[in-house]
Image (cartoon, rainbow, N blue to C red):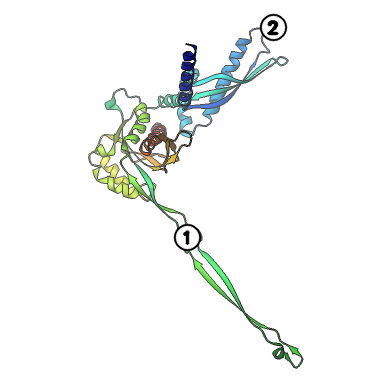
Amino acid sequence: MYFYKKLIILILGFIFFLSYPALYAQQLEQKGVGVEDYSKESGFFSDKSLIVEKALKKACKNAFDQYVKSFNEIQRENFENTRATIEKDIDKYVDCQTIVEEKDDTEKKRYSIVVKALIDVNGIKVALSKGTLIKQTKREDRPVLVFHFFTRTTDTATKKDNRVTKVGTATTSKDINQSEAIKEGDVAISSETTTASKTVSGGNIVRAATRYTYRVSDGDTLPVQAGLSQAMDRAGFVLRAANRVSGLEGFQRKIIAEYSTKEQFSDELTNEIIKALMKTDAKYYVTGIFDIGEEELDQSDGNVVVNVSLARASAEDIKNGNLLATVGGIQAKGKGTTYAQAKSNAILLAAKKTGEELVLSINQKDKD
């Protein structure tokens, strides 16, 4: 019986160990410092627990303030609009139970503490989105966002050779024998002739950037839409795939052709799409392209890993034609037992991050 109990405990512990990273995958670790001055306390200091509690709250707040400093401009402005609500419930977003260091200076009557805080990044992003202007309760009243997103893999990478100039020298000599060299007291030396040859290879410039061509696909709409929806739906948008919108059917091939060599398609093509969307109920148009990395193998567990990066995404206001946001540089890794599964997971994560950034930018511009 003892053996089976021990075995069950080991199994439960192993399961917890495997799930532990997932539990904290979306939490950020941040140190915080809190100092409580109790010099004005009357009488002898006896209730240390109260002093520790006050210092702990200050350390927790300090850790959160350090995290806020990492916000970009748009996130910071959205935070200022929701600061009171977030800071009121700061215990919901920040776990400060791990004490790293503490010191009680009895002479100066100052108690200091250092904590390792775990910050709920996703929870704060949700709180930031609640401070936006989009608060419609009925789905039919929410703004419609139409999206064109594609994925691509590298087809060819062409780089013009650097110009290379090689200079070679060849020397020929003719020896003069002694009888020929001595003439009326003069001394002649062997004659020597030097010739040079030059060869030039490569391009006509010193350096050339690599030119890429891509295989563009519209076959990953489902994971893209799933990722975008996690951010867009929560923020109050209605997400609609462009291929489901009447009047946009003819643009698919044109967009794919331009994305095969560029990070974005032409303004002329964008204007045509916006013109077509003005006949619909859509308010925003979002487009972008994800680059799919090579298949890798995780040596620790044998699973397939694929990295996906956002080349560029932009959001347009359909009614007035204003560019609301431009996002890039987002990356995400997906893991799975097959390449298709790993790629799909990576696309979903990258699309979710992209959606969050676009929501912040769109809402900020709407407030201005």
Q: Which of 109 and 73 is in front in this view?
A: 109
Location of residue 202 with respect to 1 vertically, above or below: below
Location of residue 274 with respect to 235 vertically, above or below: below
Per the image, label 1 sits on a secondary structure element best described as loop
Q: Which of 8 and 132 is in front in this view?
A: 8
Image coords of residue 7 (percent x, y): 48, 17
Amino acid beneath label 2? Phe
Left/right placement of residue 135 relative to residue 73 reads left
Going from N to C along the chain, the mark reached first, 2 or 1, is: 2
Image coords of residue 252 (percent x, y): 28, 45
The total of numbered circles placed on residues is 2
Which residue in the protein does label 2 denote?
A: 44
Which residue in the protein does label 1 denote?
A: 161
- Disc 2 residue crowd, few under 14, some 14–19, many 20+, Cα 10 Å: few
Q: Nearer the viewer, residue 270 or 344?
A: 344
Image coords of residue 257 (percent x, y): 32, 50
- Is any atom of residue 364 visible in this view? no
